[in-house]
Image (spheres, grey):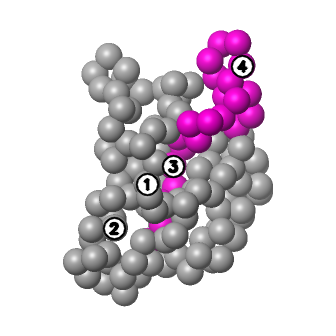
Amino acid sequence: LSRCRVGMVTTAGKIDAPLDRDGRREQRELYAMEADPPPERMFTADLFWDKAATHTDDVESFLPLRRLGEYAAGGRIGSLSPRFYGIPTDYSQGKTSQRDAPKILEWCREDGVDAVLLSAL
């Protein structure tokens, strides 16, 4: 790991995603965003988790870009990818394996990523 570039993949959406009348993302699309500086907020309202027991106000709790940057600075990992990647939660194995995963792989290769962490909500 001390020589690996590490990337992050999340199912959280970009905070500026257009919303429908019910407060859900109108379109759930793949995206790549700069990892530095890490986002202060992500859109998670349309995802499902135990909302009575926890929250997603602390982005670092599910997208630990700052912590990974600290690990890179300390030599624990080689470096952090310059971007992180967002993938929509989709219940279609075909879309995930034939469309989304190849695009994420393409971006990871562009960024020289050796290892990827998936932080799904």
For the point 56% across and 25% down, the residue is: 46
Residue 18 lies in magenta, yes or no? yes
Q: Which residue is mark 2?
A: 69
Whichever of callouts 1 and 4 sits on the residue coming sooner in the sequence is 4
The quarter of the image holding the N terminus is bottom left
Q: Is residue 10 visible?
A: yes
* Callouts 2 and 4 close, C-beta under 8 Å: no
Whichever of callouts 1 and 3 sits on the residue coming sooner in the sequence is 3
Residue furthest to the bottom: 3
Range covered by the magenta-colored residues: 6-28
Query: What percent of the width, then of the height, locates residue 73?
Result: 28, 76
Measure the C-alpha gap from mark 1 to mark 3.
Answer: 13 Å
The disc label shown at residue 20, or none: 4
Q: Is residue 1 visible?
A: no
Assess disc 1: are there few (<14), some (14-19) or many (≥20) residues with their C-alpha within 10 Å of its C-alpha: some
Measure the C-alpha gap from mark 2 to mark 4.
Answer: 35 Å
Q: Is residue 119 left or right of residue 104?
A: left
Predominant secondary structure in magenta?
loop
